[in-house]
Image (tube, rainbow, N blue to C red):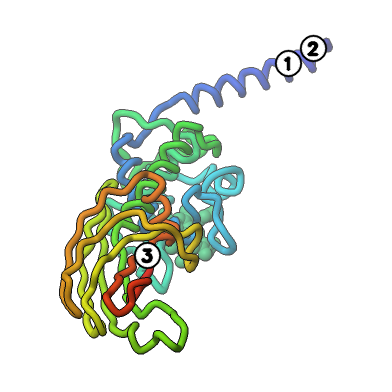
Amino acid sequence: MSRARRARVGLAAAALGLAAAAHSQTGPFTEAQAAAGRSSYLANCAGCHLTDLRGANEARPLVGPDFMRTWNSRTAQELVAFLSVTMPPPPAAPGSLGAQSYVNLAAFLLHANGATPGASALTAASTVTIGSIATGTMSEAFRAALAAAALALTAAAQQSFKVRLRPVPIEASTAANTTGAGEATAALAGTRLTLRGNFAGLKGAATAARLHQGAVMGVRGPAIADVTVPGATSGAFTAEVTLTAAQVEGLRQGQIYLQIHSETAPDGNLWGWLVP
Ligand code: HEC
């Protein structure tokens, strides 16, 4: 190896060593700040930049080389300032999330880009250069925790359902016996479904009601649970049903409907799908 080449290799090795040392620094932001930032991100930003931060259309990726190209030589302070005056953009109100939220969001973005949380907290005045703590590579642990948090949020958001009860479609000959209307709400907590509803205008007294599950929304399927309803042409009902995991999944996919039977329409009088 020539002297010049040896020198270049030596320099490169030294530079690599420096880079490695810089990236092994922690913070300056805490795990708690990044976690708070994650909740704020999923609530306020993921709609445009997507839950995995890869971005869509005009909403740029917030992780990876694209992000690092823009932010590598800028400071955390600049990132906080940028977020506070621009995000979330109109029609939402930029700056509306509160000063601490923007600091937490910046901590979240740094962590997302491979920076390691530490003991010292990020502030809106932190002058650390983003490129000195972030690599642009999201860790597997971060990715998994983010996906789990996003999933939990989706599940929580779909815990309540509405049902519009309308006459079961039938042939013209029996239409006169299939009258009435009603409505219900259903709240899911774990696997426990609480139904509250009412109906009126039946031709004959209600005889039975059941939840059914179809293979897909709009397609009828077998009964999965009994629901007790008053034996009258109108009334209110409350029922608690424990679903299996597959039924909970079916509920989220819009596969479950409620059907009420009556003396005049024993094959089904009112029905309605449980929709979010
Ligand atoms: C309505 C869609 C929308 C929402 C919601 C939104 N953004 Fe953006 N974001 C954009 C668009 C569009 C751009 C590109 C704007 C530009 O380049 O001027 C952008 C740019 C950015 C950038 C700069 C990216 C880069 O490469 O320089 C960051 C950082 C950012 N957004 C973070 C956030 C955060 C954090 C939130 C939540 C508080 C958020 N955004 C909410 C649409 C959105």
Amino acid tagged 3? Tyr
Q: Nearer the viewer, mark 3 or mark 2?
A: 3
Q: Residue at x 37, y 71 (%)?
A: 267
Q: Position of residue 187 (x, y in %)?
A: 25, 59
Disc 1, disc 2: CB below 8 Å?
Answer: yes
User: In terms of secondary structure, where does tag 1 sit?
Assistant: helix
Q: Position of residue 18 (x, y in %)?
A: 55, 23
Numbered circle sitting on residue 222 = none
Q: Residues within 10 Å of mark 2 (few under 14, many from 20)?
A: few
Q: Nearer the viewer, mark 3 or mark 1?
A: 3
Amino acid tagged 1? Ala
- Foreground of the two, 157 or 98: 157
Marks 1/2: CA distance?
6 Å
Q: Position of residue 210 (x, y in %)?
A: 31, 62
The residue at label 1 has a CB less than 8 Å from ligand 1: no
Q: Name the residue beneath numbered marker 2.
A: 3
Q: Name the residue beneath numbered marker 3.
A: 257
Q: Residue at x 33, y 60 (%)?
A: 211
Q: Residue at x 72, y 17 (%)?
A: 9
Q: Name the residue beneath numbered marker 1.
A: 7
Q: Does any portion of residue 82 appear in the rendered image?
A: no
Amino acid tagged 2? Arg
User: In terms of secondary structure, where does tag 2 sit?
Assistant: helix
